Image: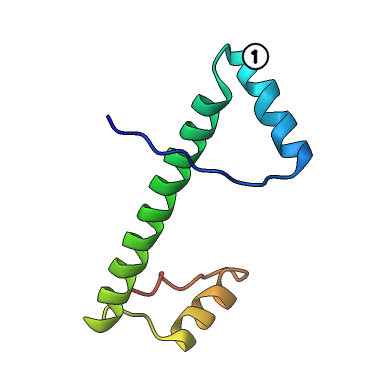
């Protein structure tokens, strides 16, 4: 696998936490940073896909009227809550 070196300026306390984690896990600092970046990128890619899916739902008309949601929420405090709007 080809590798590239990335350089980043991070706050001193964050660098110390990376060093502590590397020591505790008996891993290199680079391994810790690579794991963190891999996880962050996966999270951001999932967030982007969820946003695209939500926008497609809106475009398809799969929405619930705001007033219906407000009425449903208000009914939750009463004795006879309304069914969840679909």
Determine which residue is flagged by label 1. Answer: 24
Nearest the eye: 67 or 28 = 28
Quarter holding the C terminus is bottom left
Q: Residue at x 40, y 86 (%)?
A: 65
Helix, strand or loop at label 1? It is helix
Quarter holding the N terminus is top left
| Residue, far top | 26
Q: Quadrant of residue 64?
A: bottom left
Q: Residue at x 50, y 76 (%)?
A: 72
Graded by Cα atoms within 10 Å as few (under 14), some (14 to 19) or many (20 or more), the crowding at tag 1 reads few
Nearest the eye: 7 or 73 = 7
Q: Residue at x 27, y 78 (%)?
A: 62
Apparent side of residue 11 relative to residue 48 in the rendered image (left or right)? right
Apparent side of residue 75 relative to residue 19 in the rendered image (left or right)? left
Nearest the eye: 74 or 28 = 28
Apparent side of residue 12 relative to residue 7 in the rendered image (left or right)? right
In the rendered image, residue 4, in percent from the top left (x then y), is placed at 40, 39
Q: Residue at x 21, y 81 (%)?
A: 60
What is the total number of numbered labels drawn onto the structure image?
Answer: 1
In the rendered image, residue 29, in percent from the top left (x then y), is placed at 58, 25
């Amino acid at each position: 696998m080809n590798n590239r070196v990335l350089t980043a300026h991070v706050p001193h306390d964050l660098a110390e936490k990376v060093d502590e984690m590397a020591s505790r896990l008996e891993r290199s600092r680079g391994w810790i940073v690579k794991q963190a970046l891999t996880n962050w990128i996966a999270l951001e890619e999932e967030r982007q896909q969820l946003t695209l899916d939500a926008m497609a739902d809106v475009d398809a008309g799969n929405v619930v009227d705001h007033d219906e949601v407000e009425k449903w929420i208000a009914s939750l405090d009463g004795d006879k809550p309304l069914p969840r709007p679909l």
